[in-house]
Image (spheres, helix red, strand yellow):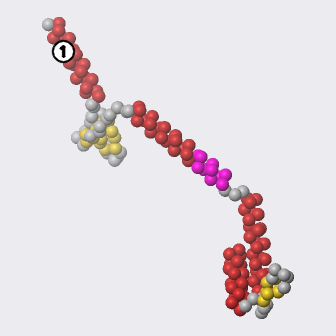
Amino acid sequence: MRYQAIAAGLMLILIGTGAALASDIYKWVDEEGNPHFGDVPAGEQAERLDIESRPTDPARIQAMNEARAVDRAETVQAKAAAELERPSAAELQEEADERANKCAAYKIQLESYTNNRRLYKASADGEREYLSDDEIAATRELAAQRVDEFCS
């Protein structure tokens, strides 16, 4: 008889533990339209929700956190590298000034090439070698391309 009482007690404990672990969740809406959730149904319109619950895997969570930390570190490193590669304001201003100077020089050169009918280049012995019509056209075209490149 004593064993029967112990067995019955253990059975009640196991049943109670199982019910506590597998309790149901209900959803219902009150008169004002607000949704409510609970483990005890309230009224006839309470709807039982099928929700599965599993224990958390600490190893999986740790791996996910480590992967996120690596991603954050890589992002920070990439931003830092991009910041180092970006030119400073002084360098940008220097480039803009150099570009403006080249633009002005190429405009003067193009104007000179356009206004002069005969163009020449200095030979190795210091003499002038006059350009042919095709060479003049090519030289003027090159000067126009440089003006477009540096002045636009």
Name the residue: 44% across, 39% down.
64
Q: Nearer the viewer, residue 86 or 115?
A: 115
Corner quadrant of residue 114: bottom right
Q: Amino acid at mark 1?
A: Ala
Q: Residue at x 69, y 85 (%)?
A: 138
Q: Residue furthest front?
A: 125
Apparent side of residue 99 relative to residue 27 in the rendered image (left or right): right
Q: Is residue 83 magenta?
A: yes
Q: Magenta part mainly helix, strand or loop?
A: helix
Position of 41 relative to 87 (above/below): above
Name the residue furthest top. 2
The residue most toward the left is 1
Quadrant placement of the N terminus: top left
Q: Residue at x 72, y 62 (%)?
A: 92
Judged from the image, the secondary structure of the residue bearing numbered disc 1 is: helix
Reply above or below: 103 against 25: below
Judged left or right of residue 97, residue 69 is: left
Residue 56 among those drawn in magenta: no
Q: Which residue is mark 1?
A: 8
The quadrant in which the C terminus is found is bottom right
Which segment did they paint magenta?
76-85
Snapshot quadrant of residue 35: top left
> Is residue 90 placed above or below 140 in the rendered structure?
above
Residue 84 location, x and y as percent? Answer: 67, 52
Q: Percent from the top left, x then y, of residue 144?
A: 70, 82
Viewer can see residue 85: yes
Residue 13 placed where, x, y %?
24, 19
